[in-house]
Image (cartoon, rainbow, N blue to C red):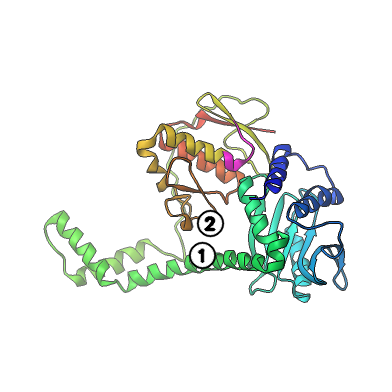
């Protein structure tokens, strides 16, 4: 662990407010500081070359070694959306054979493998969010992809390729699972037929013929589950919940959290100071695991549309972090809004009400 880099990241997270600074200030405060902690000398043009000419344009920084461009970095001011800038950066990177490129506004860092196949979004293999992610995770990923030692040795490429291939694998599996399900329903495997037959016999005492089971699967399951046209979610009527007005700086649970920095949260009258949204979810989970040890594994039931939020297998989660005192991992690659929603779902498992959790931001 790079303690100086970790300290730098934590200092940014504690300050939180940087919205008013311009592009040049963003470069000095965020980019150049980060590079110096990663072993690069911002004052040595042989290592960090500003305003690199790329033929018809310029890239803010080229990280170099032995007169070769290793990494391109394009910087924008804090808060500026990055989407409209990625195509130009990646075109320049592709043209000059640069294997890693980065687009950042200081708070958000998008990492790309420009020479790979696919559209620009597919070539983006990792995202760092300074305010929302754990400081140690951010530090480790910066070192993996951007430290001078790893860039020069080629290990940065190896680390990046590993993440990229894992993402490709996940995307391929997501796209294939519905097809596999349809195939299984249309052409039932003997194990599935046997399982349904045995379960039917246990329930009613009679074992159906295989052809009856297959006919049931093809008629009922295909009719009820249309992969290409999912049914709209059915919303059950609920009783309105009366929530007391919150202080001026306290955000209601139904409001949006994007772009806001968390300061603290209160659970059942107990207040906790936190420095990031991930820390909110971590402390909620730790609290529930401590106070509901016997049935804390209920959190394993909480899943998203594409993957679980909690698992005992770290490889089932995109960015896992272990919950203290347990063998369960939770997802950290989440937006602030999703973190709040999951936190609400977690406490509800153990009998807490929505109004038992309140969140204060700056």
Image coords of residue 36 (percent x, y): 78, 53
Q: Is residue 72 left or right of residue 209?
A: right
Magenta region, residue range:
273-279
Image coords of residue 302 (percent x, y): 44, 47
The image shows residue 139, relative to residue 84, as above or below, that is above
Q: Residue 86, located in which quarter of the rendered image?
A: bottom right
- Under circle 1, the secondary element is helix
Q: Nearer the viewer, residue 213 or 80?
A: 80
Location of the C terminus (image quadrant): top right
Gap in angstroms between the C-alphas marked 2 and 1: 9 Å
Q: Residue at x 45, y 33 (%)?
A: 239
Q: Which residue position holds label 2?
A: 318
Asked if the magenta segment contains residue 13, the reply would be: no
Q: Is residue 84 left or right of residue 310?
A: right
Is residue 133 something that shows in the picture? no
**For mark 2, does the 10 Å Cα neighbourhood hold few (<14), some (14 to 19), or many (20 or more) residues?**
some
Question: Which comes sooner in the sequence, label 2 or label 1?
Answer: 1
Is residue 99 something that shows in the picture? yes
Q: Residue at x 70, y 43 (%)?
A: 7
Q: Is residue 102 left or right of residue 288?
A: right
Q: Residue at x 85, y 71 (%)?
A: 54
Q: Is residue 38 left or right of residue 67?
A: left
Image coords of residue 112 (percent x, y): 68, 65
Residue 243 is tagged as: none
The image shows residue 298, relative to residue 71, as above or below, that is above
Q: Which residue position holds label 1?
A: 170
Labels 2 and 1 touching (C-beta < 8 A)? yes
Q: Residue 141, located in which quarter of the rendered image?
A: bottom right
């Amino acid at each position: 662990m790079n303690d100086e880099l970790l300290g730098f990241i934590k200092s940014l997270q504690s300050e939180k407010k940087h919205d008013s600074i311009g592009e040049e200030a963003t470069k000095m405060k965020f980019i150049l500081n980060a590079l110096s902690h990663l072993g690069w000398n911002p004052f040595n043009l042989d290592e960090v070359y500003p305003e690199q000419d790329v033929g018809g344009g310029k890239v803010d920084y080229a990280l170099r070694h032995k007169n070769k461009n290793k990494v391109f970095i394009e910087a924008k001011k804090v808060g500026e959306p990055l989407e409209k800038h990625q195509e130009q950066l990646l075109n320049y990177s592709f043209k000059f054979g640069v294997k890693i490129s980065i687009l950042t506004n200081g708070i958000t860092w998008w990492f790309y493998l420009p020479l790979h196949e696919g559209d620009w979004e597919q070539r983006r293999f990792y995202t760092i969010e300074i305010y929302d992610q754990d400081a140690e995770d951010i530090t480790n990923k910066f070192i993996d992809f951007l430290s001078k030692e790893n860039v020069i040795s080629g290990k940065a490429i190896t680390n990046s390729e590993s993440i990229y291939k894992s993402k490709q694998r996940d995307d391929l599996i997501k796209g294939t699972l519905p097809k596999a399900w349809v195939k299984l329903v249309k052409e039932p495997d003997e194990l599935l037929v046997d399982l349904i037959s045995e379960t039917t016999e246990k329930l009613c005492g009679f074992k159906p013929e295989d052809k009856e089971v297959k006919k049931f699967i093809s008629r009922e399951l295909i009719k009820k589950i249309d992969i290409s046209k999912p049914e709209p979610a059915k919303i059950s009527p609920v009783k309105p919940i009366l929530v007391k007005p919150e202080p001026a700086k306290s955000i209601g649970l139904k409001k949006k959290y994007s772009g806001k920095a968390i300061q603290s949260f209160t659970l059942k009258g107990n207040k906790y100071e936190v420095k990031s949204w991930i820390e909110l979810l971590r402390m909620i989970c730790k609290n529930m695991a401590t106070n509901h040890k016997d049935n804390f594994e209920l959190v394993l039931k909480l899943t998203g549309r594409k993957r679980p939020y909690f698992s005992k297998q770290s490889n089932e989660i995109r960015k896992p972090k272990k919950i203290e005192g347990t063998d369960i991992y939770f997802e950290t690659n989440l937006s602030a809004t999703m973190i709040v929603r999951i936190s609400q779902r977690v406490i509800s498992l153990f009998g807490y009400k929505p109004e038992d959790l309140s969140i204060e931001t700056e």
